Image (tube, helix red, strand yellow):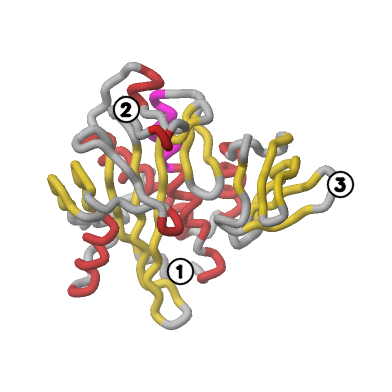
């Protein structure tokens, strides 16, 4: 049965904004928006990615969207479960166009090994509890040219030759997130984990990594309960890594 948790959500469709996440954050400073409220934009002047990185998108070509939820039922230590749900929602959307969709930890979406989407979740805390989460998603749908440093980027159009309607896909993604968010609220963590691992890029495959000590070969074995990456080195030792503590070279 389709979830109706977000039936009162408000939609803001903007031509241009500094950042869709920042737009929602400013709104939340003055009012509590209905859960599931969304902002989309044709262009972001200061789009942001994980840990201070930027998100670059050609005007009018891609889906730039943020949604607000209130996961007060989650512990702070369970916050990464929301990221898993959003990543799976994006995978379900993109799987309509390609059978080569995977999740690169922690929250990049790949098509055939190239980045097609990114997720940035910013939590607003009240004391030690999550009050609200602003979920930002950028999906490359119709862009064909990327800057040289983004050589590993792709789009749905580049992969399939199909020009997609970003607004229709915004609605579909909203529906996918709603369904997964309901599963999260029901604390179906084991089911979410299983689905996430089934999409995880390089899981149990020998790959080249780099951490503070240099390059090494290892295998991704899964995630900890807090979303840390578990990597097994060639000597059998398993190490936990947070975002930016390890890089997957190839």
- Of all residues, the one furthest to the right in this rendering is 235
Magenta stretch: give its range: 89-97
Q: From the image, tell me which residue sits under label 2.
A: 145
Task: Considering the whole magenta stretch, tell me its main secondary structure.
Answer: helix
Identify the mark at residue 36; answer none if there is no mark: none
Q: CA distance from mark 3 to mark 1?
A: 40 Å
Mark 3 or mark 2: name the one nearer the start of the chain.
Answer: 2
Instruction: Estimate the x, y position of residue 186 in percent, counting from the top left.
Output: 49, 58
The residue located at (22%, 60%) in the rendering is 23
Left or right of residue 7: residue 104: right
The residue located at (40%, 67%) in the rendering is 123
Instruction: Estimate the x, y position of residue 140 in percent, counting from the top left.
Output: 34, 34
Q: CA distance from mark 3 to mark 2?
A: 42 Å
In the picture, the quarter occupied by the C terminus is top right
Instruction: Estimate the x, y position of residue 54 in percent, counting from the top left.
Output: 36, 50
Q: From the image, tell me which residue sits under label 1.
A: 73
Mark 2 or mark 1: name the one nearer the start of the chain.
Answer: 1
Secondary structure of the residue carrying numbered label 2? loop
Instruction: Estimate the x, y position of residue 136 in percent, counting from the top left.
Output: 34, 52
Q: From the image, tell me which residue sits under label 3.
A: 235
Secondary structure of the residue carrying numbered label 1? loop
């Amino acid at each position: 049965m389709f979830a109706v948790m977000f039936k009162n959500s408000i939609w803001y469709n903007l031509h241009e904004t500094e950042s869709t996440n920042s737009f929602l954050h400013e709104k939340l400073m003055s009012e509590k928006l209905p859960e599931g409220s969304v902002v989309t934009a044709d262009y972001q002047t200061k789009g942001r990615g994980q840990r201070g990185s930027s998100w670059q998108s050609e005007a009018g070509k891609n889906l730039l969207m943020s949604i607000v939820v209130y996961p007060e039922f989650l512990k702070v230590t369970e916050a990464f479960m929301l990221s898993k749900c959003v990543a799976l929602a994006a995978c379900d959307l993109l799987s309509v166009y390609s059978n080569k969709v995977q999740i690169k930890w922690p929250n990049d979406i790949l098509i055939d090994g190239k980045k097609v989407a990114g997720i940035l979740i910013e939590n607003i805390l009240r004391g030690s509890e999550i009050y609200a989460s602003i979920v930002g998603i950028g999906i490359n749908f119709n862009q064909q040219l990327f800057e040289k440093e983004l050589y590993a980027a792709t789009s749905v159009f580049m992969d399939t030759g199909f020009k997609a309607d970003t607004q229709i896909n915004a609605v579909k993604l909203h529906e996918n997130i709603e369904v997964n968010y309901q599963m999260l609220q029901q604390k179906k963590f084991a089911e979410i984990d299983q689905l996430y691992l089934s999409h995880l890029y390089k899981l149990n495959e020998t790959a080249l990594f780099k951490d503070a000590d240099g390059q090494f070969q290892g295998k991704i074995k899964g995630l900890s309960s807090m979303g840390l990456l578990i990597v097994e080195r060639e000597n059998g030792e398993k190490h936990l890594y947070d975002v930016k503590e390890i890089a997957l070279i190839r």
